[in-house]
Amino acid sequence: MKVAILGGDGFCGWPTVLHLSDAGHELHVIDNLSRRWIDTELGVQSLTPMDSIQERCRIWRAETGRVIHFHLLDLAEEFERLKAWLGEHRPDAIVHLAEQRAAPYSMRSDRHKVYTVRNNVNATHNLLAALVETGLDAHLVHLGTMGVYGYSSVGAPIPEGYLDVEIDTPAGKRSQEILYPTRPGSVYHMTKSLDQILFQFYAQNDGLRITDLHQGIVWGTHTEQTARHEQLVNRFDYDGDYGTVLNRFLIQAAIGHPLTVHGTGGQTRAFIHIRDSVRCIELALGDPPASGERVKIFNQMTETHRVRDLAELVARLTGARVAMLPNPRKEAAENDLVVKNDQFLALGLAPTTLEDGLLEEVVEVARRYAHRIDRTRVPALSAWTRDLASKLERDP
Ligand code: USQ
């Protein structure tokens, strides 16, 4: 297949590009390199030294003989160029990862909220409108988030996107299938909730074939392909905005920083290793919905864990100290989480779990590049509300 990866320079995008190229597909990366600009804005850098996207593609070609095409294009701001590109290249499938993906970054200030909404919602809508206008029947696979569901379920397992409800009508009880009600916990998660409505409309109105992957928190860094050459290395975020919880605990352990548990650490979240993330995208590409079918939704996660249990596990493994900190986020202090992921298991996903010894691998990567870590950028300082911000100032 000819596959366009929108956001192919990012943390999930780059390993996906390599994985699909390795599988023999023709790969096109479309990216505005915003993630690299945000590093510059925040004054942080990936733990792993990353080459330019052009250099990464050159190394991949030298290693494997396979070509990856790179196109510098801003989905949210350059609608006409996007439309022209799709019309000219006519990909068979499009993987859309071109969104600002950090919840803390989206909550930093009003400017960051506005940027995240404008970028994410416009990118998605521009893409959908361009697909209709060009008459392209490409399968669109979008990387969404488990966070659209929220974390306050009544204890029932979270289904894959849809919920059957019974409604009282004058003619008696009627059942209806609805999109699972969204309850986003940040402006970033809110944009992914909005995406769901856009997808529902365009699938129903224009017959677009869309798959939405509700992904959990990704951990790990290497995939089989990124490990082939040091210049193919994936990015690795450790800072308070972009670092995700388990990877942060692992690098903190590697540099002797206390593990930064927010609040009681009673938050339970869904997790997936980066190797499984790229595999799931491949499986979803191979299983498109038909035109006129509802949006296909998968829960892209393999296990759930409570934050404090993860901290204890990392502390046991490495001898690190655990610090219970004031929580900068507005979120439930404690929650349970049961998630259905039957569809990927049925397609043959063999989950990589925390048990598989890959925690050590991340600690080793962190130790190797420890000299690149700025310890002052480790604490998470982006507060969800003014009250939480003043609490953090009092008790940093
Ligand atoms: N947390 C800590 N200590 C830290 C960092 C985080 O206790 O040092 C806590 C947070 O308060 C939160 C949980 O760990 O309760 C998860 O935080 P996270 O930063 O790992 O994950 P999140 O902000 O939810 O976002 C990440 C990705 C996002 C993706 C999402 C999947 O950045 O792109 O969509 O995970 S999910 O969480 O399932 O919505």
Image (cartoon, rainbow, N blue to C red):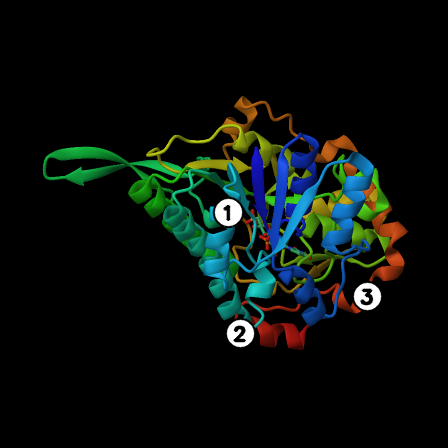
Secondary structure under tag 2 reads: helix
**Residue 150 seen from this side:** no
Mark 3 and ligand 1: say if the CB distance to the nearest ligand atom is below 8 Å.
no
Alpha carbons under labels 2 and 1: distance apart: 35 Å
Q: Are marks 2 and 1 in contact (CB under 8 Å)?
A: no
Tell me which corner region of the image, top left, top right, bottom left or bottom right, holds residue 263: bottom right
Residue at mark 3: 374
Tell me which amino acid carries mark 3: Asp
Secondary structure under tag 3 reads: loop
* Badge number at residue 88: 1
* Badge number at residue 111: 2
Front one among 182 and 263:
182
| Left or right position of 201 against 48 | left
The disc, 1 or 3, on the residue closer to the chain's N-terminal end is: 1
Above-or-below relation of 205 to 326: above
Tell me which amino acid carries mark 2: Arg
Tell me what residue is drawn at x 64 percent, y 46 percent. 13
Tell me what residue is drawn at x 72 percent, y 53 percent. 53
